């Protein structure tokens, strides 16, 4: 049996869950999320806890067991607390500002880069640190990844956009051989 899949999910105060035949809906203080249910699994709610179990022992059901439990746990945490990722913009002349739901990034190109935030995602900018907030863990990670792709950190000077506390392996550059 899946080690992750057999763990119970505790439902915090203020989070409501409704289970239909086709999808699961989780709503809380921060918002509402839905997830289609995977076949071969059954979901039960009792005593403010959710249990995900398999209907059969097929390979597809076994592989989806832990996945479905983790998706539900992420939804419950998202609607109650939310998720955030921090990105650092490092480089001389690299700047970030926010105007409405658009990030304006000066990243050393001949033009500024405008990044429009999708619905359900908000951002805050303090100096050169971008904080991405949202209730959907997958969407927060995807948006942070897309922003990082605009100017990946380079290995010589470390300039670019990186996750906070991300370690960049630095290269020494030219060795300067003598003749």
Image: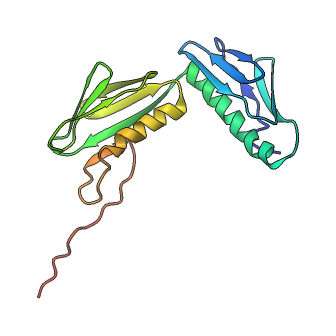
Where, quadrant-wise, is the C terminus in this rendering? bottom left
Residue 169 found in image quarter: bottom left
Q: Would you say 86 lies left or right of 179 here?
A: right
Q: Residue at x 32, y 49 (%)?
A: 152
Q: Would you say 146 lies left or right of 171 here?
A: right
Where, quadrant-wise, is the N terminus in this rendering? top right
Answer yes or no: is residue 2 visible: no
Q: Nearer the viewer, residue 179 or 134?
A: 134
Q: Residue at x 25, y 50 (%)?
A: 159
Most distant residue in the bottom direction: 179
Q: Nearer the viewer, residue 149 or 91?
A: 149
The location of residue 67, given as percent across then percent down, is: 69, 39
The location of residue 100, given as percent across then percent down, is: 29, 18
Q: Would you say 129 lies left or right of 94 here?
A: right
Answer yes or no: is residue 85 visible: yes
| 107 up-or-down from 133: above or below | below
Most distant residue in the right direction: 56
Residue 69 found in image quarter: top right
Q: Would you say 87 lies left or right of 79 here?
A: left
| 176 up-or-down from 108: above or below | below
């Amino acid at each position: 049996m899946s080690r992750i899949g057999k763990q119970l999910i505790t439902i915090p105060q203020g989070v409501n869950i409704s289970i239909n035949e086709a999808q699961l809906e989780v709503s809380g203080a921060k918002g509402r999320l839905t997830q289609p249910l995977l076949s071969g699994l059954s979901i039960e709610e009792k005593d403010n806890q959710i249990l995900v179990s398999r209907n059969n022992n097929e390979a597809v059901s076994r592989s989806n067991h832990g996945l479905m439990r983790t998706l539900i746990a992420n939804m419950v945490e998202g609607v109650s607390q939310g998720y955030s990722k921090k990105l650092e913009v490092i480089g001389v002349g690299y700047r970030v500002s926010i105007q409405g739901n658009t990030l304006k990034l000066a990243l050393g190109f001949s033009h500024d880069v405008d990044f429009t935030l999708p619905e359900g995602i908000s951002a805050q900018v303090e100096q050169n640190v971008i904080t991405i907030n949202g209730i959907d863990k997958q969407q927060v990670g995807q948006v942070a990844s897309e922003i990082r792709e605009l100017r990946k950190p380079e290995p010589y000077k470390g300039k670019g956009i990186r996750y906070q506390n991300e370690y960049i392996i630095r290269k020494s550059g030219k060795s300067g051989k003598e003749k």
